Image (spheres, grey):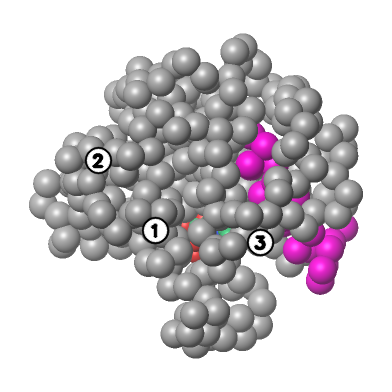
Amino acid sequence: MTSAQPSPAWIANKQVLITGATSGIGRAAALELASRGAQLNVIARDQAKARALADEIAQISNSTSVRFFHADLADLDEVRTVAKTIGSELGPIDILVNNAGVAARWPRVTTEGRDEMLTANYLGPFVLTHLLLDQVLAASPARIVITGSEAHRMTGPFDAERFEHLGQYSGLAAQLAYGRTKLLDILFADELAARLAGTGVTVNSFCPGLVSTGLTRDVPGADRLGRLLSATPLIRTPKQGARMLIHLAADAEVDGVTGRFWTSTPGLGLLPAVAARRHPAVAERVYRRTCDLVGIKELTA
Ligand SMILES: NC(=O)c1ccc[n+]([C@@H]2O[C@H](COP(=O)([O-])OP(=O)(O)OC[C@H]3O[C@@H](n4cnc5c(N)ncnc54)[C@H](OP(=O)(O)O)[C@@H]3O)[C@@H](O)[C@H]2O)c1
């Protein structure tokens, strides 16, 4: 990875639409992208946090505007509504970053009867991406970046015919359930990249490494422990964790590169892809079933 060399010319004035920018990795990435001159558009569920981000960005860049769109990604009606608003208020989208995510310790069910973590991490971003695709295609060459995780390697048995049934989970099973949502994100990136081949829109997923953020805010003491450990090489600060996202979103050298999962952890790139990613039929089947589950028209290659 060579993100140490910023490419301000490439990202300057590009329209970036990012989720999960009110905290952690996404917030650090948003600040850096703004400082490089990107025009930022943020989908957030918390208006106060979004305003605080906009204020902070205004202090570091007077050439960057920040537009805020409200949606809870765990609510598919809100996702459809925000996509409509973005469709009427924003033109072509050069870089779409699906970064928001949660690591739930136990299941919560949405008003639509879906697992909240599955919806926030996977189904919501899946719907959002499809509904915004025309705007991304209109900006071609354009990029879609999806925050995955090395946790996708720990899912327990994966069944493409039942992936949405996370069931009851807590403790280790909660980590496996989170890992499954991240595997789904990465399979989506793989499949979308294949279906968008030749359009000029690239799709890549990545893992930021182990980063001290709000992700484990539900775990008693984890926040403080994470901050302490981020002073050691064991855990990264959000700024360090954002490097790969910034690289994939902003560096000219990844122009045209698509369909890859990028890890930020030295050595892990040598690991073979997990079984579900070695057989493209799995990503295809998961993609089709997800379209059926959320009522999205399948994108044909
Ligand atoms: N931290 C790690 O070690 C690590 C490792 C691998 C991958 N990741 C991935 O990195 C991404 C960013 O997480 P983070 O570590 O930076 O955690 P974080 O500090 O908790 O940030 C998560 C972001 O996602 C937003 N979000 C969560 N649920 C949402 C929903 N239903 N609707 C809209 N926005 C929602 C949060 O909004 P609020 O501010 O409103 O809560 C926040 O902006 C996630 O996809 C995570 O899975 C993290």
Q: Amino acid at mark 1?
A: Arg
Give me the disc on residue 215: none
Q: Secondary structure at mark 3?
A: loop
Q: Residues within 10 Å of mark 3 (few under 14, many from 20)?
A: many
Q: Is the residue indicated by label 3 positioned so its CB lies within 8 Å of ligand 1?
A: yes
- Residue 210 visible in this rendered orientation of the protein: yes
Callout 2 amino acid: Ile
Report the residue at 84% width, 63% height from top: 173
Amino acid of disc 3: Ala
Q: Is residue 84 visible?
A: no
Q: Is residue 28 above or below residue 90?
A: below
At 65% from the left and 16% from the top, the residue drawn is 298
Distance from Cα at disc 3 to Cα at disc 1: 21 Å
**What span is colored magenta in the figure?**
168-188
Secondary structure under tag 1 reads helix
Where is residue 178? Give x, y as percent.
72, 56
Q: Which residue is mark 1?
A: 243
Front residue (pair 74, 169): 169
* Residue found at the very far left of the displayed protein: 62
Viewer-side residue, 53 vs 236 = 236
Residue position marked by numbered label 2 in the rendering: 11
In three-dimensional space, the C-alpha distance between marks 1 and 2, rounded to whole angstroms, equals 15 Å
**Residue 138: x and y, percent?**
35, 17
Q: Toward which corner of the image does residue 57 lie, by quadrant?
A: bottom left
Answer with mark 2 or mark 3, whichever residue precedes in sequence: 2
Based on the displayed image, in which of its 4 quarters is residue 218 positioned? bottom right
